[in-house]
Amino acid sequence: GRKNLTFLDKECSRFIFPGTQLSMWRFAGQIACRSVWRRSRTFSPIVRMSEAADGQAISKNELKRRMKAEKKAQEKAEKEAKNKAAAAAAASTKAEATGEDVEPAVDTKDMDVTDYFEYRCEKVQKMKETSMHPYPHKFHVSIGLADYIAKYSSMESGQHREEESVSVAGRIHSERSSSAKLVFYDLHGEGVKIQVMANAKFAEFDFPAVRNVVHRGDIVGVEGFPAKTKTGELSIIPRKMQLLSPCLHRLPGSFYGLKSQELRYRQRYLDLIMNDYVRQKFIVRSQIVSYVRRFLDELGFLEIETPMMNMIAGGAAAKPFVTHHNDLDMDLFMRVAPELYHKMLVVGGMDRVYEIGRQFRNEGMDMTHNPEFTTCEFYMAYADYHDLMDITEKLLSGMVKKITGGYKVTFHTSSGEEMIADFTPPFRRIDMMSGLEKVLGAPLPKADALHLPESIEQLKQLCAKHNVECSPPHTAARLLDKLVGDFLEVQCISPTFITNHPEVMSPLSKWHRSEKGLTERFELFVCQKEVCNAYTELNDPVVQRERFSQQAADREAGDDEAQAIDENFCTALEYGLPPTGGWGMGIDRLTMFLTDSNNIKEVLFFPAMRPAGQGAAEGEGAEKSAEPAQADV
């Protein structure tokens, strides 16, 4: 007896009382007060712990958890076997009654994504061998889902309009079986949904067969009559129901949805299927483009198209993409801006022109930059940058009011900070050089001497003093741009014009009429980001060549974003460019603000991405390092 008690003392100190001073004899006294069956149950875990299958000791709770899991798995297997047997029996009964072979229904809820895909592929292949082809050529849709809701939402609860017949189509997002003869589907399309109340009583089709082949994610056509359930749910009761295109992959669960940003950007079609708010963002983007086009058309502008490939990458300070023309055997540059072509057209007498199109810049990707992006540029003869500021205020304030219903827009940064931009005109205006001197509390070099070495050194010292980083080459334009970014742009939450840039920063802008060394240029900032850039155009061919020469010197110093000399454009200026105002706006970035999207990838259908599996690029903070293998997240 003492030997057994010694063994128990050792086991208890190991499993029940680790690190405690409780006496085994006191424990034995407590046990002795209990009934025999309670005592046996108390000691049984000790024996089980010492006899764990993997040789490791397990706790009493862990043992219960394992036993519960085993029981649950056994019950699940029994249920699956029972369901299969019932389905096979039902199919056999129907086959005897009709003389046709009927495939039993299969429960796909517990299939993994691979098994589900294989099952659907096999099912679809079998359908191709029958009269119920899974990919029909045509289905007549008599009314869209949005119009259906508008037309029949006023019906009373419980009302059926069997005398009417309509046909609709959409994608099934959920399926709920009430009984073998009554199934409810949620049919989505056009950003809305209606309920399909499939009742075998009204079906003029093979109800069990269609129910067996239609699954969540499939696109179906339904012909039937409008109805409302007793609970007020607008529905359509099908007389005919047809599979139009099966979804071979299992959709992500409707409760958790599709959350992975990596997967959403790479498979935008799946993102649009699962997330209606994404659809709304691109609707707003389309409204922005439509409003701009209508606004400019009403001002007498002509929409034009200019080349995407150029022999010289001009019109903006940016690094271009290079492509090759096989027939000409020469390298060409994808356009970084259409500006020079537009001004050539103004020279030719096209006084008001605009273009909405893609630009390509071989630069970094981050949350506000994509290598290809959409802009709107217009050029207006006999106008200056003061006229353009007035037009900008009217355009943007009217657009925001039209799309959002008010002038104030709420925007959240990637860190969660909330910004409220007020587009009520007039917009705030900041003079660049004087505003920068005021913030820095120190004088800047004279605007007409910024190209001198001593001026560049003074700017470098200011950057070092205020911990402003600027990568080489340290040109006056790059140093000033960094200072403006750190001290002026951060003040611009509501729309703000930063005006009168130095000539070294604006090679295509006309000199200021009263301030030497400055230009008549402005940039519009919203929520600390640039949205518009405009200026009174430089139309003196001699001065333009001098500006291009300065840009060429910067290029030789290592600035690969500086522009090259475009002799063809200079020749066009020699024929006479009237006083002209030029204006450009980024469509993508404006869409970000009006849809409260802090990542530019949210407002591009197919943003630039690294190849799957290579990890996120520097600055691509919203992307994950690897793509999930399946959409079933």
Image: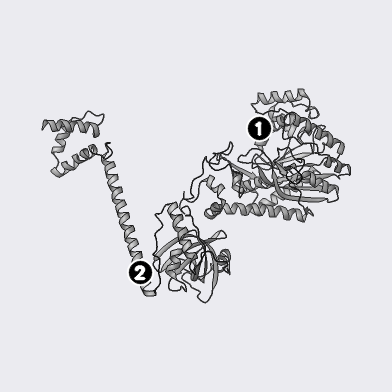
Disc 2 residue type? Ser
Q: Position of residue 555 (x, y in %)?
A: 75, 32
In the rendered view, tell whether residue 70 sits above or below residue 54.
Answer: below
510 versus 250 height, above or below: above
Identify residue for label 2.
Answer: 92
**Three-letter amino acid code at disc 1?**
Asp
Tag 2 secondary structure:
helix
Query: Quick one: 82 or 155, which is closer to the camera?
Result: 82
Percent position (x, y) of residue 205? 47, 72
At label 1, counting other C-alpha atoms closer than 10 Å, the crowd grade (few under 14, some 14-19, many 20 or more) is some
Q: Secondary structure at mark 1?
A: helix
Determine whether, in the image, residue 555 is placed left or right of residue 153. Answer: right
The extreme left residue here reads: 1
In the figure, is residue 229 to the left or right of 376?
Answer: left
Looking at this rendering, what residue extends furthest in the bottom direction? 163
Whether residue 233 appears in this view of the structure is: no
Q: Is residue 38 above or below residue 473?
A: below
Q: Give the mark toward the camera: 2 or 1.
A: 2
Residue 617 x %, y %: 58, 38
- Residue 164 seen in render: yes
Q: Which residue is mark 1?
A: 486
Badge number at residue 46: none
Q: Position of residue 109 (x, y in %)?
A: 40, 56
Quadrant of the image containing the N terminus: top left
Task: Tell me which numbered mark, 2 or 1, is placed earlier along the sequence.
Answer: 2
Q: CA distance from mark 2 to mark 1?
A: 77 Å
Label 2: how many Cα within 10 Å (few below 14, some 14–19, many 20+): some
Seen from the viewer's position, the closer of residues 124 and 617 is 124
